[in-house]
Amino acid sequence: MGRVFAYRSRQLAIDVRHECTHALLHATLPMVPLWLDEGLAEYFEVPPAERAFDNPHLAPIRWTARLGVSSRIGKLDNIGDMNEMGGSEYRYAWAWIHFMLHGSPEAYEELVRFLADIQAQTPPGLLSDRLQNRLPGLERRFAAHFRTWKR
């Protein structure tokens, strides 16, 4: 039986949602790329009503998108150690999850296929490669998503 441990604090609900996301992913998939694991946990750690529009990561991502700055998803795909995950990496991991869930039906479909391949133990390749092959102008579309995202 699995267990989730969290420190009792004001952030307990957030920590439990974050850690339970990791637990669910690892209970159903033989592996999950680190950035994807953390990006999904960051996305689902906030209450459901806040996930699409009120996540604390949204404002800085929107700001950098307006300035034309973004993180290439390939950079995230190359992260292999938790020590390489800083604040910026967590923010962009969340942003790519947001884009795949809310920004593009094709990106959402590719995420679902990628996870299904992992579950079926079919070598999935890199999610960044799959998205770039499926969505021409991926980086431009990612930035445009955050420049135009509103209620």
Image: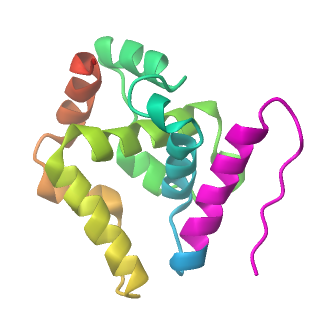
Asked if 5 appears above or below 76 in the picture, the reply is below
Q: Quadrant of the C terminus?
A: top left
Quadrant where the N terminus sits is bottom right
> Quadrant location of residue 149?
top left
Left or right of 129, for residue 97: right
Specify whether 126 is left or right of 134: right
Work out whether residue 148 or residue 65 is closer to the camera in this orientation and state it: 148
Q: In which quarter of the image is residue 12?
A: top right
- Residue at far front of view: 49
Give the left or right position of residue 138, taking residue 71 as reference.
left
Instruction: State the image coordinates of residue 130 (x, y, percent, origin top left).
Output: 24, 62
Colouring convention used in this rendered image of the protein: rainbow
Residue depicted at x 19% and y 31%: 140
In the image, residue 4 above or below residue 90: below
Q: What stretch is highlighted in magenta?
A: 1-26
Image coordinates of residue 127 in percent, x first then y, are 33, 61
Observer able to see residue 125: no
Residue drawn at (18%, 34%), measured in percent from left and top?
A: 141
